Image: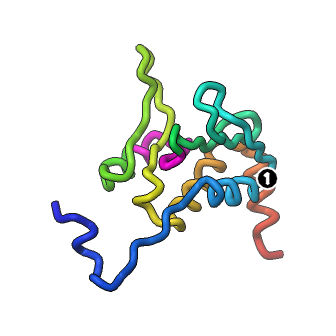
């Protein structure tokens, strides 16, 4: 498989990496979001309705987005160098989310993942209210 860097025109500069501050800004702009710290890793975690929808990795160069298992599997299959479906390592092997290497994925896609994860985890009434508020009258 060809290296994606080789496919980029020589004069094109790489897209700037998305960081914690970008994710914080996008997440906190959504309704009823709270930021906390992961109890063990001590990195930012964003919740809605008490449910985590995005969390940063240990070194904050990755993030896990709580999207559907099918969406995570599809993304990991399409871009295995940048994305991975994450499951618990215990006997349950339950699905956690989509882990993304933030330096490899453009900011527009990361922002979309923040919104999609919020929609996946937010109470359905809150999602419906946001959609009503966003639609033109």
Residue in view at x 21 percent, y 64 percent: 3
Where does the magenta region start and end? 60-72
Which structural element holds mark 1? loop
For residue 108, say whether it is visible: yes
Residue 31 in the image: state x and y as whole percent.
Answer: 79, 53
Residue 38 in the image: state x and y as whole percent.
Answer: 64, 32
**Mark 1 — residue?**
31
Residue 53 in the image: state x and y as whole percent.
Answer: 63, 42
> Is 52 situated above or below 93?
below
Q: Residue furthest left?
A: 1
- Of 40 and 99, the residue lying toward us: 40
Residue 122 in the image: state x and y as whole percent.
Answer: 70, 44
Total numbered badges shown on the rendered structure:
1
Residue in view at x 47 percent, y 66 percent: 106
> Is 94 situated above or below 90?
below
Residue in view at x 58 percent, y 30 percent: 41
């Amino acid at each position: 498989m060809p290296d994606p860097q080789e496919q980029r025109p020589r004069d094109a500069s790489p897209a700037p990496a998305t960081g914690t501050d970008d994710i914080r800004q996008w997440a906190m702009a959504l309704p009823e979001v709270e930021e906390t710290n992961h109890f063990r890793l001590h990195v930012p975690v964003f919740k809605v309705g008490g449910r985590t929808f995005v969390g940063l990795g240990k070194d904050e160069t990755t993030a896990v987005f709580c999207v559907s298992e099918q969406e995570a599997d599809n993304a990991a299959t399409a871009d295995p160098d940048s994305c991975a479906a994450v499951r618990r390592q215990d006997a349950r092997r339950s699905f956690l989310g989509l882990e993304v290497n933030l330096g490899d994925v453009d900011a527009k896609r990361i922002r979309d993942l923040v919104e999609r994860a919020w929609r996946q985890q937010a109470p359905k009434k809150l999602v419906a209210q946001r959609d009503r508020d966003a639609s033109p009258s």
